[in-house]
């Protein structure tokens, strides 16, 4: 099973990176092949709304999104990790998500199916997120993430939304949260059906 681990934070070794590492380790423990991409090391322009994808189903803007599109569709599972920036995913993550407008066009304008992953089973995904404020709610973010996953035809099989972690690496003080991230990686790489997926508790 191929898994793409997408790091949406510009902060290396930060809180979402830590969760991403744990989930990746969990997936690898099940024999999955995990490839990590770091969005802020790539050049991914925001969607230009040029609508050229309405004719082809593929984004026409030639930047680092193109190989990432292939990697995304070529993965059986995705781990999407993003910090909360102004109540939603980071700008790096949002630019990545918006470029999948081409798959929206493929399905709803061109009336074609979203290709299945190479394994032939429905694509699976987990979402990992942290926020600094103890008061932060993740509902706004989750609307975005669910819309993205629906567009790429992926099933959300688990998530972690952890607030009250702000400093770089603060998440390491919560070993139970790290264990949960590892277990989510295991679940992603297995055929286990998800429990009811709900917003996580705060750390
Ligand atoms: C530009 C920016 C915007 C942020 N906006 C929020 C916010 O709206 N709510 C919140 O609780 N934390 C916010 N934070 C704090 C981060 O979500 C928090 O520090 C998170 O744990 C960082 O994860 P990382 O270490 O993976 O980058 C913001 C941080 C930055 C840099």
Image: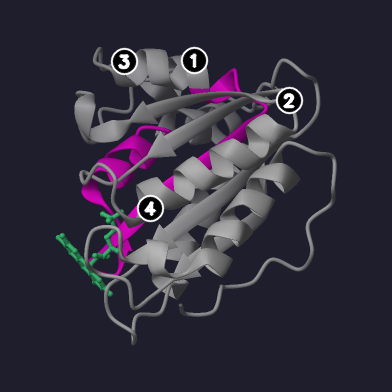
Could you tell which of marks 2 and 1 lies nearer the N-terminus? 2
Q: Which residue is mark 3?
A: 60
What residue sits 39% from the left and 40% below the top? 97
Residue 181 occupies which quadrant of the picture? bottom right
Give the spatial CA distance, label 2 vs label 1: 22 Å
Q: CB at mark 4 closer than 8 A to ligand 1?
A: yes
Q: CB at mark 1 closer than 8 A to ligand 1?
A: no
Q: Which residue is mark 4?
A: 16
Q: Which residue is mark 1?
A: 70
Q: Which residue is mark 2?
A: 31
The label nearer to you, 4 versus 1, is 4
- What is the magenta range? 72-100
SS category of the residue bearing label 3? loop
Q: Is residue 141 left or right of 160 when viewed as pictured? A: left
Give the x, y percent position of residue 188: 70, 42
Could you tell which of marks 4 and 1 lies nearer the N-terminus? 4
Q: Is residue 131 left or right of 77 when viewed as pictured? A: left
Residue 154 occupies which quadrant of the picture? top right
Could you tell which of marks 3 and 1 lies nearer the N-terminus? 3
């Amino acid at each position: 099973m191929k898994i793409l681990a997408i790091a949406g934070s510009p902060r290396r070794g930060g809180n979402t990176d830590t969760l991403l590492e744990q989930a990746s380790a969990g997936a690898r423990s099940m024999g999955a092949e995990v490839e990590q991409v770091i969005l802020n090391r790539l050049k991914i322009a925001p969607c230009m709304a040029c609508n050229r994808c309405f004719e082809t189903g593929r984004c026409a803007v030639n930047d680092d999104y193109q190989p990432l599109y292939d990697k995304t569709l070529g993965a059986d599972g995705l781990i999407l990790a993003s910090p909360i920036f102004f109540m939603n995913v980071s700008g790096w993550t949002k630019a990545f998500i918006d470029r999948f407008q081409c798959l929206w066009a493929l399905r709803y304008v061109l009336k074609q199916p979203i290709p299945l992953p190479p394994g032939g089973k429905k694509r699976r995904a987990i979402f990992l997120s942290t926020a600094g404020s103890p008061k932060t709610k993740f509902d706004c973010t989750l609307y975005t993430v669910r819309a993205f996953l629906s567009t790429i035809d992926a099933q959300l099989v688990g998530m972690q939304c952890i607030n009250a972690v702000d400093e770089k690496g603060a998440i390491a003080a919560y070993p139970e949260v790290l264990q949960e991230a590892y277990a989510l990686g295991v679940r992603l790489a297995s055929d286990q059906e998800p429990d009811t997926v709900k917003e996580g508790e705060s750390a």
